[in-house]
Each structure stands twice: as structure tokens, then as C-alpha cells.
Image: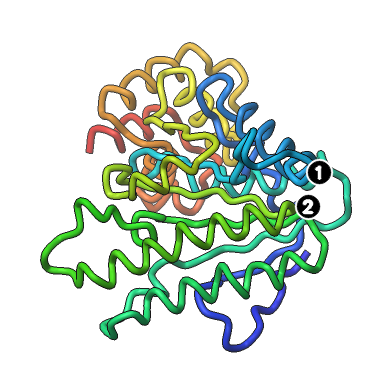
Amino acid sequence: MPALTVPPGVEGIVSLHELPDPAWQSRWDRMFMPEGLKDRLLNLTLFCLRSRGRIDAVRLPIHGLTLLAGPPGTGKTTLAAGLADRAARDLDDGPLLFVEIDPHAFPSQMLGESQRSVARLFARTLPDLARRGRPTFVLLDEVEALAVSRTGASLETNPVDVHRATDAVLAGLDHVAGSCPNVTFVATTNHIAGVDAAFLSRADLIEQVPLPGLEAVTQILRDSLAELIPVEGLDGELGGLAADCVAAQLDGRQVRKLIVRAVTSRRDLALAPHTLRLEDVRAALRA
């Protein structure tokens, strides 16, 4: 499905998509995560979208908020998008609306402007989208730029505006949780220490997305190489290459980029990538 047009004058929204979309399925299927992590993410999302509206918020407080934390390149943003697509398939309630928020659209040099912009997003924009009645999945990428830790705010920033903007995020989450049970949030961060403690306390699930281990790197290598060459019978060699990648502390994105580096290391490979060998990939890792 094509991306929807973001209404003019709407602050903070990067894109709108209707899901499921066949082009998004690999964002879930091809993300190799520690055992159980994807199941927990999907289970919480389905539980929130199916049941949160019938649950007393005092007896069982549910904000519909998941936080994915970990180093850059570990696939947090891609995984979040894939989660939305997979949830849309499992719900089978018609199109799910995927909303991507840009936290960097809000900071302003004008005192209080960040607070007002964030408040409009949570008090008006997101509820307006939720009133369409669809399951709605909101991605807050790099949330440390939006829910800034008030105790760790740098003196180089405007501490009053930082406090006000973070207050607006917290109040907004509470408002959406109470009034829009068809909305669920996934936030990502590369720097969990920079996220405000009150935001973290509102998360129903916090998952650490680590650098990939040996098994995950082996799967990533096999998956990436299969785009170019047959990989049957290469398991033994892939294990050794994967161990070298783990020792080099490559993140998942760097492992996939390693194949690109290998292909582009020589003109003959660039013109005939189907001739790539594992030795070429090892050479790219050593380079």
C-alpha cells in the first residue's frame, strides 16, 4: 500500500502508512533477535489493541507503550515497523494505521514552544487519527530527544523548556492511554540513560536489543548472502565468519553492510555479484 499523505500543518508526523503491506513483511521476518523477544513484543501489542479498552486503568495501568533500547544498528526501528505490520496481519481488523513521529521536529529556541507543539500532538493530532476507529501504531523513534531526562538535562539546553516539553509528553501519554484504547506506542532509544525516568515508568515493556550473538550473526550472513549467491552447504564456513564478526563487535546493520563492502571491493564483483565468495567477505572484514 502507498504511504498516506500527512495533512498540512501537522507537526511532528513524518509518515502515515496503512498496514499490512507485503513490502513490510521482511521487516519482521528478517529480523533475527534473541529468543522470545519478538513474541513478547507481539503479544503485548495484540493484548493492548484487543483488550486495553476493557481494563480498569487503576487496577491494571496499561499505557500501551513499549520501549526498545540498545546500540545503534541493532534493528530497533526496523523491528518496530515490522511489529506493526505483523500485528496488522494477526488482528485482521482491516487496515492498521502506522504513524511515525519525528522527535526532532519539536525542539525550539522559543520558550514554551516545544511544550505547545508536543501537547498539540498528543491532545489533538493523535486523538484525531484514533477517532478513525482503526488500530493505530505510533512509532516514537529516538525518544530520548522527546522525553528528555529532567534530572540529567544539560545546562547548555534551556532547562525550563526541557522540563515543560517532557511534562507535555508524559501528560500526553496519559491522555492518549485513557481516551484512545486503539492506540499503541513503540519508542526506541540508543541512550536509555537520557530518557526521563517517569517515561520509563509508564512503559509496559522495556526490551534491550543487544548486538547480535553468534547465532543471530550466522542467520544475518546467510540471509544477506542469499540475495546474491546460493548458500546451501556453507553453514560450517558461515559459522567461522560469524564468529569473526562477533569478535569485531559488528552490529546487525554492519554485518549486512559487510556483504556490500565485499561486493564493491573489486570491479569484477561489482559487475558480477553472483561470483562473490566467502573469502571476499572475510577480506572485507579484515580491511
In this rendering, position of residue 156 left or right of residue 108: left
Q: Residues within 10 Å of mark 1 (few under 14, many from 20)?
A: some
Secondary structure at badge 2 equals loop
In this figure, what is the number of numbered marks?
Answer: 2
Residue 266 horizontal side relative to residue 117, left or right:
left
Q: CA distance from mark 2 to mark 1?
A: 6 Å
Residue farthest toward the left in the current orientation of the protein: 155
Residue at image point 37% right, 38% down: 70
- Residue 167, placed above or below residue 237: below
* x and y percentages locating residue 159 in the rendered image: 20, 67
Q: Residue at x 37, y 61 (%)?
A: 166
Q: Is residue 233 left or right of residue 74?
A: right
The residue located at (52%, 79%) in the rendering is 11
Q: Could you tell me the amino acid type at mark 2?
A: Pro
Q: Nearer the viewer, residue 153 or 255?
A: 153
Identify the residue under disc 1: 89
Name the outermost residue toward the front.
58
Kind of residue sitting beneath label 1: Arg
Q: Position of residue 268 (x, y in %)?
A: 43, 49
Left or right of 189: which side holds 175? Answer: right
Residue receiving disc 2: 20
Can residue 112 be seen in the rendering of this structure? yes
Between residue 3 and residue 154, name the one nearer to us.
Answer: 154
Q: Are marks 2 and 1 in contact (CB under 8 Å)?
A: yes
The quadrant of the image that shows the C terminus is top left
